[in-house]
Amino acid sequence: MRRREAPGRKGGARNPWGGSRPRRLHVATALALLTLTGCSEVTFVTPTPAPEPTPTLPPIGFNHRYGNSPVAAADGRELERGLYARGEFWEIAIGAEPLLAGFVTVESPDQADMARVQTSSLTVIMASEVLGTIRSFLRFGRPGQLAYCQALLDRLRTKGYHNLSQITMYIYFGESDRHALLTWTQVDGYQFQVFDNDLLGTPINPTPGGGPASATPPPPTPTPTFFTTFPP
């Protein structure tokens, strides 16, 4: 009697999972090829970000070099340009307090006038790097320098600053020489201090005899920073 072979053993080893092994291998290979083919056709698209709006100045933009508010900057620029027209080359910057009072539309005379009326204090910085301007100013002497600065402040006050309680004015030669300080209050009036001895004995202001002159070093005073202060 001939022995019958178990199913699945003919032509190869029996597959414990059922069916023939070669057929299952062909199916797995086909699936792998399909998967690889599908991956090769995938395109990764990076979305283009929407363009950001170009930054612009706010509607009430102004030049901070001349002042800490639109009204102060307009008055500082006008004062500086008036000096330039006379051949006196000073840079002017004005700080007005309270700060937010000056944030109005300068082109509106009523709003600008109201801002000046509401201002209680002014800080003015006057600086020059022009040798001719510095020498002309020093030739005035102390009384003449005081009168010159007073005239500038009086001109500024005629713009409508009628309710001031104090004014502080710094005079600089170049970027580092703090020449003088002028203050005004309703109680004490004008006070004028010179810190660099009018640069006597220096090439800018040599003494009449040509000899050196002693100068008292200026006391430390914080540099005003009103022009870096903006409203929140």
Image: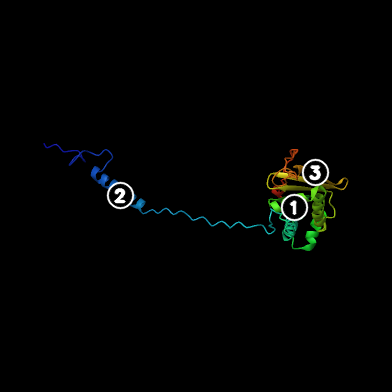
Judged from the image, the secondary structure of the residue bearing numbered disc 3 is strand
Q: Which residue is mark 1?
A: 136
SS at mark 1 in the image: helix
Q: Amino acid at mark 3?
A: Gln
Comparing labels 1 and 2, the label whose residue is closer to the camera: 1
Q: Residue at x 26, y 47 (%)?
A: 26
- Is tag 1's residue or tag 2's residue first in the polypeptide sequence? 2
Q: Nearer the viewer, residue 25 or 49?
A: 49
Q: Relative to residue 54, is residue 15 depicted above or below? A: above
Q: Position of residue 133 (x, y in %)?
A: 72, 53
Residue found 23% across the figure and 44% down from its top = 22
Q: Residues within 10 Å of mark 1 (few under 14, many from 20)?
A: few
Q: Which residue is mark 3?
A: 193
Q: Is residue 146 visible?
A: yes
Image location (x, y in percent) of residue 19? 25, 43
Earlier residue among tags 2 and 3: 2
**In front of the other: 3 or 81:** 81
The residue pinned by badge 2 equals: 33
Q: Is residue 10 left or right of residue 229?
A: left
